[in-house]
Amino acid sequence: MLAARNIDSTNATVEPLPLVPTTCTIPRGGCLEFIKLSKWPMRSNPSFGLVVKPNSVATISSYSRCFWFDVKVLVMEHLIKEIEQDALNTAFMTGVKRIDDRVLEALRSVDRRSFVRAEDIKNAYVDYPLDIGFGQTISQPFIVALITHLTEPKPSDKVLEVGSGSGYQAAVLAKLCNRVFGIEVIPALCDQSKKNLAAEKIDNVILMVGDGNLGLPHEAPFDKIIVSAASSKLPTILLEQLAVGGILVMPKQISPYEQMLIKINKTSDTEFTIKDILPVRFVPLINL
Ligand code: SAH
């Protein structure tokens, strides 16, 4: 299989040109796709070829002018590069020059295609937020990477996400932490997110319908809390449910048109430090 690193995914030209095999075996659960060089996914045009059946032999002699890659790996690496570049571009505000390698590895291991609507599968690896229905969005991968990095995830962590939407952010956290609880206010989104996580065979996320403003008192304290929707108030109930030494990351509505991603460290039962990270745009946290 051709290694993605042979290809400079930031350029339309590909060097060195890979050899074209005439047959290839598709790995279990694999996703080999044909791609024409002219259709190399650019930021603005991520279109690419068709998936062929897993565990089968594909003959591509008729595609002699095509090159084959494991497009999933390739496009993912392109996205990872964009995330790394976004981190560098925003480091003067966030203080984060490099996203932790373990976070990038978690992003690689969760297929964002499982979390987007069928019509958006072609955009699943693009560094944009996408509509998931009901006026809600799945966050931009860079923002998911940044938030995950800011929570300083540890394998023993018990995490709460308020506003779990498609389940994507929860899935990325689940790769790095012990258990993730997600609260989603829209029942149909919660149902869909359970299916999305099952498709990714992630079994350490517990999703439920409810008002995230109330947290989950019977599961508290949490080592980390992420609020994935914007609120002008600091969530005192959630901060009570945060363990001492814990971290809460959320978008704060600072004016009708401005939000700031903030990181709160709980230093004692009554003391917190709050750091501004980056201007962002999230959907509002619904107050029931
Ligand atoms: N992190 C999610 C995207 C979140 S979008 C993902 O990876 O897909 C924000 C989500 O917060 C929406 O799905 C919205 O329905 C939900 N939400 C808004 N107010 C809420 C509340 N009070 N309680 C729980 N969920 C809420």
Image: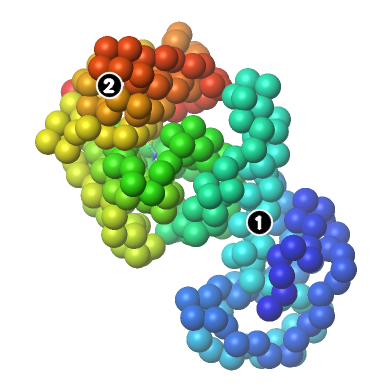
Residue at 62% in and 64% down:
73
- Tell me the element at label 2: helix
Q: Is residue 234 left or right of residue 85?
A: left
**Residue 22 location, x and y as percent?**
74, 90
Vertical relation: 102 (above or below) 75: above
Q: Along the line of sight, which residue is nearer the eye, 189 or 215? A: 215
Q: Along the line of sight, which residue is nearer the eye, 249 or 258? A: 249
Q: Is residue 160 left or right of residue 279?
A: left
Vertical relation: 167 (above or below) 69: above
Residue 230: which quarter of the image? top left
Q: Residues within 10 Å of mark 2 (few under 14, many from 20)?
A: many
Residue at 51% in and 16% down:
276
> Can you identify the residue that label 1 sits on?
77
Residue 190 seen: no
Residue 26 seen: yes
What kind of residue is marked 1?
Glu
> Can you identify the residue that label 2 sits on?
239
What kind of residue is marked 2?
Leu
